[in-house]
Amino acid sequence: MALDNTTTEELPLLLEAAGRCPPEDIGGAPGYAAYLDCIGDPAHPEHEQTAPLGPGAV
């Protein structure tokens, strides 16, 4: 099946997405909420172990 007119003009483009979704196997919505609390609070007991999973992590 050949497709005619396969340009990308007028198609939506993803411009910014880094850090916009939870890491894999975070534990659903409750786990993601706990994760956000943890990475947002440097005084959290698990912050240093969890922060590398946050935005910008490889």
Image: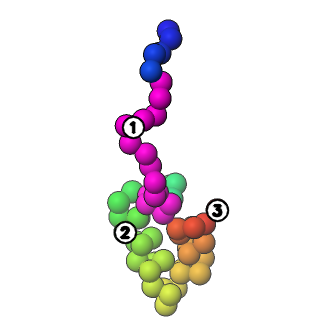
Q: CA distance from mark 3 to mark 1?
A: 29 Å
Q: Is residue 26 magenta?
A: no
* Residue located at (35% from left, 60% from top): 29
Type of the residue with mark 3:
Val
Q: Which residue is mark 1?
A: 11
User: Pointer 2: residues within 10 angstroms few (<14), some, or many (20+)?
Assistant: few
Residue 30 visible in the snapshot = yes
Residue 27 in view: no
Residue labelled with disc 3: 58
* Of the two numbered discs 1 and 2 in the rendering, the one whose residue sits closer to the viewer: 1
**Three-letter amino acid code of the residue under disc 2:** Ala
Q: Secondary structure at mark 2?
A: helix
For residue 29, above or below residue 6: below
| Foreground label between 3 and 1 | 1
Q: Is residue 23 above or below residue 4?
A: below
Q: Nearer the viewer, residue 8 or 39?
A: 8
What range of the chain is rendered magenta?
6-22
Gap in angstroms between the C-alphas marked 3 and 2: 21 Å
User: Which quarter of the image is occupied by the C terminus?
Assistant: bottom right
Which corner quadrant of the image does residue 13 belong to?
top left
- Mark 2 lies on residue: 33
In this view, 27 is above or below 35: above
